[in-house]
């Protein structure tokens, strides 16, 4: 077979098959070389599946195949060699035997070397490119791909058929219905339809508009997805001008643009996305029909489908939680009160879970006497679901806290853990917070999305897990928070639009509030100058948690922050397209009780322009932040500035190249997590000074080249995660000195680990090691020689995966 053919298509798989078949066919005839043949066959059996797997990954990424050429040349020589070894010519077999044996051995070594070195490097390159592409997508804003619909759906067969038929007829079509009817769910189902997928393929864009559309961010992401260079737009008009490039990029490829949750008054926005080009479709979900556009109205569920959805929402351990003693007439009245709204049916159904028969009957009797039965009202239905009783009353406050985060945005579990740890003394490890969110998820009051866990004590790291919430439920959460007068509110949630405070706040004459939680959200038109908002003198002496959500490129903290003497946690999130600079972060330095700081998508250099004294700070979390030269220019004296810091989390900070030297002076540090920082190349040399460190998580730091030998001095280290650290070739020779290490994670593309030399001999001294988690049989076998010494060790092989949930 010509080399050109091998290099095209299934090069590696076919090459391996050719050699493998030859070995199986002629192996018995080559008696003089039997041991060499056995070794060769054993390695081909062992490596062929992995070779095929890598070949497929390379094709999907459209990567060059030059790296395989050397092996293909070896295979071509190997075929001829095998033929010679199996000849009946006794002269060649006797007098050439030694030479053939050596050549077989060289062929075997070449294959092993290729698999363990060349192919590992190729795969490392492939994975790096994938990670870089993923990181680029992460940095350009939210994913505009369509998420899968819920697992259980009812009543959409006919609407799906009708909607699809009308979509073929119109270039712009409105899908209208009141909130909570399932418009977004129907669109997700539509995008899973075979005809739709065949027609549009990957050219389906899903954009959530809401009541505060960020036109510039939408245009940036659409153009980026289409492969265009994206400039910084000076205005919405500038963005619209660049939007005209989209048809040029897409060409004649059929494209479907979905604009979800478009509010009244947005007709002009829709016109900006209208292109006069064939095969370009726009589908809009909205609560209000716009007369100038064609529309399809989604009806509420009929009685049969409503009952089916309600029954499914009450399932608990496979059976309905509704007591058999409940008369059907009460259920029927309640269903009529839900008006066929899927959201109401799911939330009400979930509210019955865990309730006694008496509580269920009492609620249904009360509801049956309410005028909601004859006059269905979704808002009232949802309010009914918040009638918690007994110990479950506490869940209402957690539900209301979710309103602290912006509409149609993901709320990261890590942020909620920080919030609830200080407000309600929930555990530091997040277990109680997750249990609470799972309860809200069961009741359909929020949707919890969690990445796959390994089921171990130290796997409770929730940085990529998040919560979403229907906008009607968020509105309900905020409304419930405002039931008391401002001076008695426990949480103060404010949305500032165009530098104007909400009227409900200004009408209260800025009365002091007892709120323990304050959340302030601003849009992209906010000037970042709080002095322009004259009514913004918030008096909240008891506030313990401050949540700031913004979209500006430059952002200043409100000046009243330095008066919050009881403040314990600050969560600052930039939802804009680019990193933002905090220009007065030093306001926090006077807060003597501040324990937690979480920053998302902000520029870190500004934090070190002046000394910051945070003597009480225990936890610092930096997510998708930009470091620049922040650490290199810092002369911070940690013992004075951060004497009580015990946990640092740095995640998806793509320009983090090295950790600061002062980090090694954080003597009380117990947890250090640096994950998905692909350019981090080395750990600080003085890491042995972190004598209290118990958790070291370095997952997906793809450029990290080694673990320093000094890591052996971390005598209190209990957990180490080096999963997906592509550059690490060997474990430190003295790793056995980690006498308290209980758990080691080495999952994923840790491909350069030197399998031939095995683990360091000192590994036998890890007497406390209880669990090793990997996702490869070969890596698991590395531990076999140590099983007699490590009697408590479990080596667990988990499924290999690349999580894309954060996109």
Image (cartoon, rainbow, N blue to C red):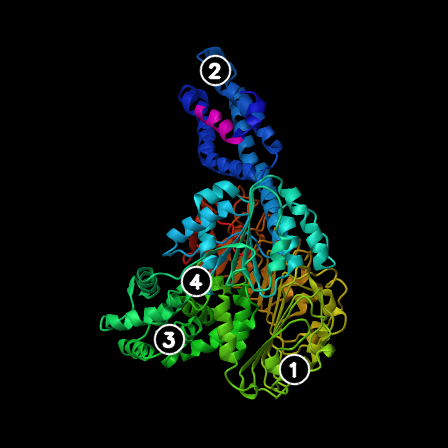
Residue closest to the eye, 464 or 513: 513
The kind of secondary structure element at disc 3 is: loop
Tell me the residue that label 1 is attached to.
592
Tell me the residue that label 4 is attached to.
181
Does label 3 or label 4 sit earlier along the sequence?
A: 4
Q: Compute the Cα span from label 2 to label 3.
A: 95 Å
Q: Are marks 1 and 3 in contact (CB under 8 Å)?
A: no
Q: Is residue 18 magenta?
A: yes
Q: Is residue 655 magenta?
A: no
Tell me the residue that label 2 is attached to.
93
Q: Nearer the viewer, mark 1 or mark 2?
A: 1
Residue 341 falls left or right of residue 613:
left
Does label 2 or label 3 sit earlier along the sequence?
A: 2
Judge whether residue 428 can be spotted in this image: no
- 10 Å neighbourhood of mark 2: few (<14), some, or many (≥20)? many
Q: Are marks 1 and 2 in contact (CB under 8 Å)?
A: no
Q: At which x and y percent is residue 335?
A: 33, 68
Write down the region rendered in magenta: 12-21
The kind of secondary structure element at disc 2 is: helix
Q: Which quadrant: the C terminus?
A: bottom right
């Amino acid at each position: 077979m010509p080399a050109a053919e091998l290099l095209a298509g299934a090069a590696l798989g076919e090459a391996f098959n050719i050699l493998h078949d030859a070995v199986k066919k002629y192996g018995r005839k080559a008696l003089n070389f039997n041991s060499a043949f056995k070794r060769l066959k054993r390695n081909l059996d062992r490596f062929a599946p992995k070779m095929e797997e890598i070949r497929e990954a390379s094709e999907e990424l459209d990567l060059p195949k030059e790296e395989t050429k050397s092996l293909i040349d070896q295979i071509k020589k190997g075929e001829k060699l095998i033929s010679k070894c199996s000849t009946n010519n006794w002269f060649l077999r006797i007098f050439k035997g030694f030479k053939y044996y050596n050549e077989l051995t060289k062929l075997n070594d070449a294959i092993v070397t290729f698999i363990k070195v060349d192919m590992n490097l190729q795969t490392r390159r492939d994975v790096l490119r994938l990670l870089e592409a993923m990181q680029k997508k992460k940095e350009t804003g939210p994913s505009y791909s369509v998420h899968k619909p819920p697992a259980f759906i009812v009543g959409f067969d006919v609407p799906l058929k009708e909607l699809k038929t009308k979509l073929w007829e119109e270039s712009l079509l409105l899908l209208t219905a009141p909130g909570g009817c399932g418009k977004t769910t129907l669109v997700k189902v539509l995008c899973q339809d075979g005809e739709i997928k065949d027609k549009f393929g990957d050219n389906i864009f899903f954009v959530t508009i809401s009541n505060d559309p960020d036109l510039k961010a939408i245009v940036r992401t659409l153009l980026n997805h289409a492969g265009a260079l994206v400039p910084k737009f000076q205005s919405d008009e500038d963005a619209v001008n660049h939007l005209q490039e989209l048809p040029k990029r897409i060409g004649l490829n059929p494209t479907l643009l979905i604009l979800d949750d478009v509010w009244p008054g947005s007709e002009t926005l829709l016109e900006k996305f209208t292109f006069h080009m064939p095969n370009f479709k726009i589908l809009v979900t909205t609560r209000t029909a716009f007369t100038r556009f064609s529309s399809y109205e989604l009806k509420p569920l009929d009685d049969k489908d409503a009952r089916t959805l309600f029954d499914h929402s009450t399932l608990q351990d496979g059976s309905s939680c509704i007591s058999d003693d409940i008369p059907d007439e009460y259920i029927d009245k309640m269903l009529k009160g839900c008006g066929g709204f899927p959201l109401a049916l799911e939330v009400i159904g979930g509210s019955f879970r865990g309730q006694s028969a008496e509580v269920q009957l009492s609620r249904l009797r009360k509801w049956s006497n309410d005028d909601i039965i004859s006059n269905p009202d979704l808002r009232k239905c949802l309010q009914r679901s918040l009638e918690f009783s007994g110990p479950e009353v506490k869940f209402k406050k957690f539900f209301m806290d979710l309103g602290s985060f912006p509409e149609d945005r993901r709320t990261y579990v890590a942020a909620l853990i920080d919030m609830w740890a200080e407000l309600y003394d929930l555990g530091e490890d997040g277990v109680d917070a997750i249990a609470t969110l799972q309860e809200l998820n069961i009741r359909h009051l929020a949707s919890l999305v969690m990445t796959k866990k390994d089921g171990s004590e130290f796997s409770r790291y929730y940085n990529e897990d998040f919560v979403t919430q229907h906008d009607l439920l968020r509105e309900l959460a905020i409304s419930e928070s405002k039931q008391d007068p401002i001076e008695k509110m426990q949480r103060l949630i404010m949305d500032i639009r165009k530098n104007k405070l909400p009227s409900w706040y200004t009408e209260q004459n800025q009365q002091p509030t007892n709120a323990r939680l304050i959340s302030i959200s601003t849009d992209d038109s906010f000037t970042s100058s709080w002095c322009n908002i004259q009514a913004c003198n918030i008096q909240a002496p008891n506030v313990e948690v401050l949540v700031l959500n913004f979209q500006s490129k430059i952002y200043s903290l409100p000046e009243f922050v330095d008066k919050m003497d009881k403040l314990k946690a600050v969560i600052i999130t930039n939802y804009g397209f680019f990193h933002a600079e905090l220009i007065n972060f030093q306001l926090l330095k006077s807060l003597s009780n501040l324990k937690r700081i979480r920053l998302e998508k902000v520029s870190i250099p500004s934090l070190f322009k002046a000394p910051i004294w945070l003597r009480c700070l225990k936890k610092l979390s930096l997510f998708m932040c930009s470091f620049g030269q922040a650490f290199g220019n810092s002369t911070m004296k940690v013992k004075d500035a951060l004497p009580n810091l015990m946990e640092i989390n740095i995640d998806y900070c793509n320009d983090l190249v090295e950790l600061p030297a002062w980090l090694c002076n954080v003597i009380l540090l117990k947890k250090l997590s640096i994950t998905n920082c692909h350019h981090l190349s080395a750990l600080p040399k003085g890491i042995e000074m972190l004598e209290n460190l118990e958790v070291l998580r370095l997952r997906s730091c793809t450029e990290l080249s080694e673990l320093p030998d000094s890591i052996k001095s971390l005598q209190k280290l209990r957990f180490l995660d080096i999963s997906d650290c592509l550059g690490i070739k060997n474990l430190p020779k003295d790793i056995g000195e980690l006498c308290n290490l209980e758990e080691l994670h080495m999952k994923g593309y840790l491909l350069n680990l030197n399998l031939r030399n095995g683990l360091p001999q000192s590994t036998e001294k890890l007497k406390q090691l209880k669990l090793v988690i990997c996702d490869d049989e070969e890596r698991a076998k590395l531990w076999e020689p140590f099983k007699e010494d490590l009697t408590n060790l479990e080596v667990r092989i988990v499924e290999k995966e690349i999580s894309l949930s954060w996109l």
